[in-house]
Amino acid sequence: MEKKNLDWSNIGFGYVQTDKRYVSNFKDGAWDEGGLTDDANVVLNECAGVLQYAQTVFEGMKAYTTEQGKTVIFRPDLNAERMVQSAKRLEMPVFPEDRFVDAVVQTVKANEAYVPPYGTGATLYIRPYMFGTNPVIGVKPADEYQFRVFGTPVGPYFKGGVKPLTIKVSDFDRAAPHGSGHIKAGLNYAMSMHAIVTAHQEGFDENLYLDAATRTNVEETGGANFLFVTKDGKLVTPKSNSILPSITRRSLVYVAKEYLGMEVEERTVPFAEVKEFAECGLCGTAAVISPVGKIVDHGNEICFPSGMTDMGPVTKKLYDTLTGIQMGRIEAPKGWIKVVE
């Protein structure tokens, strides 16, 4: 398929409207058959449940052009599974997992001209989401919902190369132990906006959130999980019931064990231990891994031996291996790559 005439190597990480998107509506206890539409606009009643009580969940993933010229999607089945858990937690109807994957494939296929060519550093970001649509004034779940999927071409998260981040220990809490931190709900991201704006104003790139119960353990940032590397080359990831189960983190853990032969620990990480690590990174769909060079805790600096210039050597191996799998340069584990045909 002929690609759109875009400056692929210089597009930013933002929204570009594409030709088609998928829409399905839930009414009278059932989802309709759904389908693709040209209309990018959503029209809602002023009292729609999503506008009054933030009843919305979403996912994020990417489609790539591989070295072999195929269009592929990375592990959409895990996004489908996670959206099921998010919907259940907010008392929303489950959109069936097989239909979720099919809707994503339909959307990518209909917008294949917007999937950036191999080697440009760009990808097609895919956003499935669901929200309450009917008027709700009392505090209760909506009765009607809409599920949508759109795609937008995006450039690499890092423009001009990878620069390790400087992050601060936040005074705000991201999620309570029995709250909604483990699901991908819009409300979690809304509450983090004041904290991230404040961090940026103070000259930091991101926040490190501690657990709300004791404020002694590392949780995550506003939109990414943490990875740490010990001085003897072991991968450590924080474990908590209020951390979002990142698909990228789970993939990197597998890569570390099965491709790189690393020892991996998924456990509680006391903040007091952070100064002992050799490398630190944030992992998520957008950048795969964002290296961290420095963490500042109310004026006290933790500087990682990997430094403020490049990714640490172990983090770089993890990054190169996972992106190699995504782009078709390295053989993928069974079921990780969905080919759009």
Image (cartoon, rainbow, N blue to C red):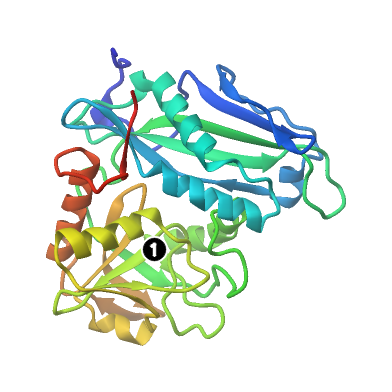
- Using the image, determine if residue 1 lies above or below residue 215: above
Find residue 70 and report its horizontal and vertical position in percent: 24, 27
* Quarter of the image with the C terminus in it: top left
Q: Residue furthest right?
A: 138
Q: Is residue 204 visible?
A: no
Near-viewer residue (157 or 127): 127
Decide: few, some or many residues near mark 1? Use Cα within 10 Å; few <14, some 14-19, many ≥20.
many
Kind of element beneath mark 1: strand
Q: Is residue 322 left or right of residue 237?
A: left
Find residue 207 and report its horizontal and vertical position in percent: 43, 66
Amino acid, disc 1: Asn
For disc 1, the marked residue is 225
Find residue 283 and report its horizontal and vertical position in percent: 33, 58
Residue drawn at (13%, 79%) of the image: 232
- Using the image, determine if residue 289 lies above or below residue 226: above
Residue drawn at (22%, 45%) of the image: 332
Q: Is residue 212 visible?
A: yes
Q: Is residue 98 left or right of residue 234?
A: right
Q: Is residue 86 left or right of residue 329?
A: right
Near-viewer residue (243 or 120): 243
Residue drawn at (67%, 55%) of the image: 90
Q: Is residue 305 left or right of residue 27?
A: left
Residue drawn at (31%, 65%) of the image: 166
Find residue 278 and report its horizontal and vertical position in percent: 19, 75
* Quarter of the image with the N terminus in it: top left
